Every structure is written in structure tokens, then in C-alpha cells.
Image: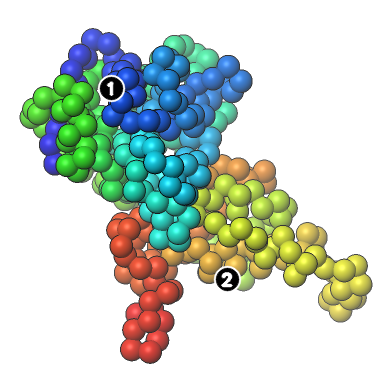
């Protein structure tokens, strides 16, 4: 790995990264860039596909918000050969989700360049919007403000996987002095790109190892507390039913999940379109039936279907209209599933999905 310090710190971190992405297009090193950018129609930056460097004035890749998982958009751009080189600017969890989608033959990384960042977390959309209204430069302020960093989602504040894997270039802010950063080349492709843009190899950021270790310790402690509390709550049937008790069966969590990929979901078929007589028969047999039905089946099915691939992005909690912390449940259960199979989603594109592996005549380990 090679570190390339910020060329001109006076112009600020956001503008430096924006200029770097503009140069990638201007010098024809890439055909398109997918990255968060502000627009006239939304009060939060949205994933945007650029081909014209002169249109990139709103690019804000380090903005502490993620209204959707960009893994979905990245997958749509790479699901079939286009002959174009596309730069994908993704958070670490989005890269992990994209790797899982590659394994499921939903997309390809053949013509992709992946740029990621030290992920300090994201705020919920409303919190980000409110903070952005208090003054300009929300991203620069967030990167240097422990107070603002304390307003990230619970999922992010308990995430240990804040450093990207399987990226070509990392935008490094941990360990840097305020207003400074570095570009870390993780692959030969990344090294060649940075040097084509005029970046010179330099020393590591002065406090990088120290800051990474401190953040990892802090998040590990928070994660243990959260997972212990969630596991205790769900240790009984009544506890599980209470956890999901306000579920509306809106399926927002399924839609927002970047690794939920089925073209046809069983819950949108006739299997769960119960006729009135069946609902009335259930109510007659039990005396009462909570509506909507099958909420428990829905969440248990999703846990068994994609628990091995949960990347902990937290989008499921963010989109829940009933404010159910779906991500806490998924991450708590998925960690045990992944540990059982010794499987880390997004770790290696060549690592087989555990449920599809047969060893000694049996599936899995």
C-alpha cells in the first residue's frame, strides 16, 4: 500500500477529491463516475452518474449521509458489459455488498475502478439536512467535529468495518491533520491512476495507526453492548414478537437491502396473498389474529435467506416507517451465522457462498 498526501490542502478536502474525479474524466482515464452529489431537487446528496467533468460542481463523496446504498446503482451499471470504464465511489459496506452481488452473477467488476474512504459513518437524512442548514461546508465540518460525528446512525457507531477492502484507492482522513488527507493506493491499478494524476508518493499520515486503533476500540465496545442487548431481547419468542411488533409488512427493508436481489420475492406472490376465508379461519381457531399477518415469517425468511451476506449498512432501519431497528436484529443474528461458516461478506470475490458449498457430502462446514 502506498500513501499519496494531499497535493494542495488550501483548497479543502471536498474540492480536492472533486478535482481528482474531474481529472479522471478530463484525462480520459475513465468514461464515467458514480458518486454522491448535491442536486437542485433533493436536500441530501444522491448517487449521480457523471460523464462530463464540467457538471461535477456538486460532487461530495465524503458527505456523511447515504440516502440509499450505492451498491444497487453500481450493480445496475455493471450488470452487463458496456465496454466503458466506470469509477465507483463507494463506502466500505457498499463495496462489500457489491462483492456479494458479483458472486450472485448480478454484476461484474471487470471494467470498474473502485474508490472508497475511511468511513466515519453517516447521519440519517433528516439529521443531515438539519445540520447542513446551520452553515456551509457540512462535510468539512463533519470531518473535524467530534460533536457532529456523534450524530451518526447507531449502525455506523457500532461498525468495525470502517476501512475499505477490495478498493483500488482509499480517501484517507483518519490520522490526518485538520483539512488534510491522503490517497492510499491499494492496487497497482490505483497506484497507476494516482501517478497519472500527478500525485507523488509520500509518508503515511502521522497519527493514522493511532486513530484507527482508537476508533476500532470505541466501536467494538459499542457493538458488544448493542449486540448483547439485542440478543437478550430476542432470546424468547415473546421478545422477538415485541421487537417486530410494529411491523407493517411494507417491505421497505427488503427494498433498501443491497444484497436482497431476487427478481421475484415470495412475499409478493400468491403464496402470501391469503384469501379472506383463510384469515377468518385463523381468527376463529385462535380467537384473534394480529394484522397484518406473516410479519414474523417475513423477517425470519429474510434472516435465513441473506443472513450470511448482511454487510451491516443499516439501510433497513433507516427506511422503516415504524422505527423498528431492523439492522440491530439482522447484524446480531448475522454475526453468529457468519462466524459459524467462517464467512465474511465482501471479503473475497472468489470465496464461495457458504450455503452453496458441499463438503464430505454435506452442505456448509
What label sits on residue 287 in the rendered view? Answer: none
Check disc 1 and report its element: helix, strand or loop.
Answer: loop
Residue toward you, 183 or 239:
183
* Residue at the image point whose x is 48% and y is 35% from the top: 66
Image position of 196 (left or right of 114): left
Residue at position x 31%, y 39% from top? 113
Residue on which disc 1 sits: 27
- Please provide percent x and percent y for residue 243: 61, 58
Q: Is residue 109 left or right of residue 122?
A: left
Label 2 to label 1, Cα distance in Å? 59 Å
Q: Give the foreground label among 2 and 1.
A: 1
Q: Earlier in the sequence, mark 2 or mark 1?
A: 1
Residue 61, position as x, y percentages in the image: 39, 28
Instruction: Confirm whether residue 210 shows in the render.
Output: no
Q: Is residue 207 above or below residue 214?
A: above
Color encoding of the figure? rainbow
Secondary structure beneath dot 2 equals: loop
- Residue 107 drawn at (x, y percent): 44, 52
Residue at 54% x, 56% y is: 260
Residue neighbourhood size for the residue with mark 1, other residues' Cα within 10 Å, grouped as few (<14), some (14–19), many (≥20): few
Q: Residue furthest front?
A: 83
Q: Quadrant of residue 239?
A: bottom right
**Which residue is pictured at 80% across the width and 60% down the height?**
291
The residue under label 2 is 236
Q: Position of residue 326 (x, y in %)?
A: 56, 53
- The reply to whether residue 66 is in sight is yes
Q: Nearer the viewer, residue 165 or 80?
A: 80
Amino acid at each position: 500500500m502506498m500513501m499519496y498526501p494531499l497535493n494542495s490542502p488550501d483548497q479543502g478536502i471536498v474540492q480536492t477529491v472533486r478535482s481528482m474525479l474531474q481529472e479522471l474524466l478530463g484525462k480520459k482515464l475513465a468514461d464515467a463516475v458514480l458518486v454522491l452529489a448535491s442536486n437542485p431537487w433533493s436536500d441530501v446528496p444522491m448517487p449521480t452518474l457523471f460523464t462530463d467533468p464540467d457538471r461535477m460542481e456538486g460532487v461530495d463523496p465524503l458527505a456523511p449521509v447515504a440516502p440509499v446504498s450505492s451498491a444497487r446503482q453500481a450493480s445496475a451499471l455493471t450488470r452487463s458489459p458496456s465496454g466503458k470504464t466506470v469509477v465507483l465511489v463507494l463506502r466500505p459496506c457498499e463495496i462489500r455488498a457489491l462483492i456479494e452481488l458479483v458472486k450472485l452473477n448480478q454484476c461484474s467488476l471487470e471494467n470498474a475502478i473502485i474508490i472508497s474512504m475511511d468511513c466515519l459513518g453517516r447521519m440519517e437524512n433528516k439529521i443531515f439536512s438539519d445540520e447542513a442548514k446551520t452553515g456551509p461546508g457540512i462535510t468539512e465540518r463533519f470531518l473535524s467535529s467530534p460533536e457532529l460525528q456523534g450524530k451518526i446512525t447507531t449502525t455506523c457507531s457500532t461498525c468495525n468495518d470502517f476501512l475499505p477492502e477490495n478498493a483500488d484507492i482509499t480517501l484517507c482522513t483518519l490520522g490526518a491533520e485538520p483539512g488534510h488527507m491522503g490517497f492510499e493506493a491499494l492496487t497497482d491499478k490505483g497506484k497507476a491512476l494516482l501517478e497519472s494524476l500527478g500525485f507523488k508518493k509520500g509518508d503515511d499520515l502521522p497519527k493514522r495507526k493511532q486513530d484507527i486503533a482508537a476508533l476500532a476500540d470505541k466501536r467494538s465496545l459499542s457493538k458488544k453492548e448493542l449486540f448483547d442487548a439485542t440478543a437478550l431481547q430476542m432470546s424468547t419468542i415473546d421478545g422477538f414478537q415485541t421487537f417486530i411488533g410494529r411491523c407493517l409488512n411494507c417491505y421497505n427493508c427488503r427494498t433498501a437491502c443491497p444484497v436482497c436481489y431476487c427478481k421475484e420475492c415470495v412475499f409478493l406472490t400468491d403464496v402470501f396473498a391469503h384469501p379472506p376465508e383463510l384469515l377468518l379461519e385463523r381468527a376463529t381457531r385462535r380467537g384473534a389474529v394480529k394484522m397484518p399477518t406473516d410479519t414474523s415469517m417475513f423477517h425470519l425468511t429474510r434472516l435465513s435467506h441473506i443472513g450470511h451476506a448482511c454487510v451491516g449498512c443499516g439501510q433497513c432501519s433507516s427506511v422503516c416507517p415504524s422505527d423498528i431497528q431492523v439492522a440491530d436484529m439482522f447484524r446480531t443474528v448475522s454475526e453468529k451465522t457468519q462466524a459459524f461458516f467462517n464467512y465474511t461478506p465482501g471479503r473475497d470475490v472468489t470465496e464461495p457462498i457458504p450455503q452453496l458449498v458441499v463438503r464430505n457430502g454435506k452442505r456448509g462446514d
